[in-house]
Amino acid sequence: MERNPQLNAAGELQHLLSIEGLPPGILTQILDTAESFVGVTEREVKKVPLLRGKSVFNLFFEPSTRTRTTFEIAAKRLSADVINLNIAVSSQSKGESLLDTVANLSAMQADIFVVRHNSSGAPFLIARHVKPHEHVVNAGDGRHAHPTQGLLDLFTIRHYKKDFSRLTVAIIGDVLHSRVARSLIHGLTTLGAPQVRVIGPQTLLPMGVEALGVKVFHDMREGLRDCDVVVMLRLQSERMKGALLPSAQEYFKHYGLTLDKLSLARPDAIVMHPGPMNRGVEIDSSVADGPHSVILPQVTFGIAVRMAVMSIVAGN
Amino acid sequence: MKLPDAENLCQQLVAELAPRLGPKSAMIGLYTGGAWLAERLHGLLALSTPLGLMDIAFYRDDYHEQGLHHDPKRTKIPFDVTGRELLLVDDVLYTGRTVRAAMNELFDFGRPASITLVVLADRGGRQLPICAQYCGARVEVPAGMRLRLKRSPDGKLALALEAKGGA
């Protein structure tokens, strides 16, 4: 059997490419380590010396502000040097290949590559070609995976709900195009959440999504009933241009989260969103800013989770 | 080989520390054994400042060789360390590297007036210029063995020798 490309010979995390295929022990190790880093982000000097002298290259082949910024903050709080490369507008546009770009950066003594790419699998390709002391962290590849977002979602759920063993989680919206949804579903099933639901119109749910171990609903009211956790996905406006959806108003009517629909979930349900939000499209402002919303804590926890991932891979 | 009784050493440390405490005194225990000892001493000395607990995992000097292997606990210091007379508590003093890491972490919280090191046992073998101001006992440890503090379910503390590399 071929070894999981994310793990080293000792079974430790060498690269973080996808939540799929990671054993529960490693997911728990990341969440526990992140818990300790939350403490670091709350004190006077928000820095620890773990990655002193290490270089973290943020390779963003696809634009992103939030994810790049949180990786940058996380690396800086670990005392690493951070180099941001917005490749969409540099060497790639001059025709350099992905592996040539990485080889050049490697010659500049890189230790961690944080990679976002619009092609699924690009971080895997890089991970196969880097030197043994170099580590790759996937910051989102195509429609495939966004493991640190999935991990911060898991961290947020565990923070508010303590454990996964009795939870009903609903993931709502454009599951088809969402790497966030895919990563979270794998994480939840690995950590033993008994019921994961996906809710959305037929056109925005992947064919055969049930095979991931989820229950499918097309009626949002039915799907929200007794949920502990509600995860809203961003509806990308370009979807409206194709034949997938009639209009934003129509979508909001059926799949937008309002206080009225949320009242069907459990009274202590939490509402999450990976951002950026489209208010009035997938979520109403009264919910986004309401007492059930944990959308901003998600961002804060995201820094601690990324610190945990980078400090674990760089030490292995 | 007979090890000193940890409970007696606790009482002895309490007797030595009690007359030295002042209004600015505060205590911090190092996970895991040092935290148990600190919980005990903190209660017996009736310190009014709440106890701080620290895991030095993010400050270890062997990270580049060892990585982050155990699941670190969260450091919690529920008071402002600036201006405090700190009692830093660990179970066993050996190379001194843990204490070095702990002092580095402490200064990321503020500037204490002083740090005093309190340990239950000193097994020698220092690799850094560090010594404990309060030490329960000196203990000879055979090569290849590790001296650890254990806590039984009823809360009783005891020193134990175990083979290196064991859990």
Image (cartoon, rainbow, N blue to C red):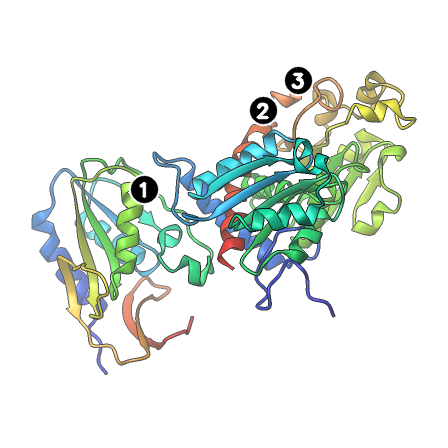
Image: A23 above or below A77: below
Q: Could you tell me which secondary element the residue under label 3 belongs to?
A: helix
Nearest the viewer among A104 and A221 is: A104
Q: Could you tell me which secondary element the residue under label 2 belongs to?
A: loop
Question: Decide: marks 3, 2 in contact (CB < 8 A)?
Answer: no
Image: B124 above or below A125: below
**Mark pair 3, 1: CA separation:** 37 Å
- Which chain is indicated by disc 2? A
For the N terminus of chain A, give its image quadrant: bottom right
Nearer-N-terminus badge (3/2): 3
In percent of width and height, residue B43 lies at: 23, 50
Residue B156 located left or right of residue A84 = left
Could you tell me which residue is drawn at 36 percent across and 55 percent down?
A: B60
The number of numbered discs placed on residues in the rendered structure image is 3
Could you tell me which residue is drawn at 52 percent across and 33 percent down?
A: A300
Nearest the viewer among B159 and B101 is: B101
Could you tell me which residue is drawn at 23 percent across and 40 percent down?
A: B49
User: What residue sits right under mark 3 in the picture?
Assistant: A285
Q: Residues within 10 Å of mark 3 (few under 14, many from 20)?
A: some
**Mark pair 3, 2: CA separation:** 12 Å
User: What residue sits right under mark 1 in the picture?
Assistant: B77
**Mark pair 1, 2: CA separation:** 29 Å
Task: Residue lying at the far left in this picture: please name it.
Answer: B19
Residue B36: quarter of image: bottom left
**Residue A291, label in figure:** 2
In percent of width and height, residue A132 lies at: 57, 61
> What amino acid type is highlighted by mark number 3?
Ser
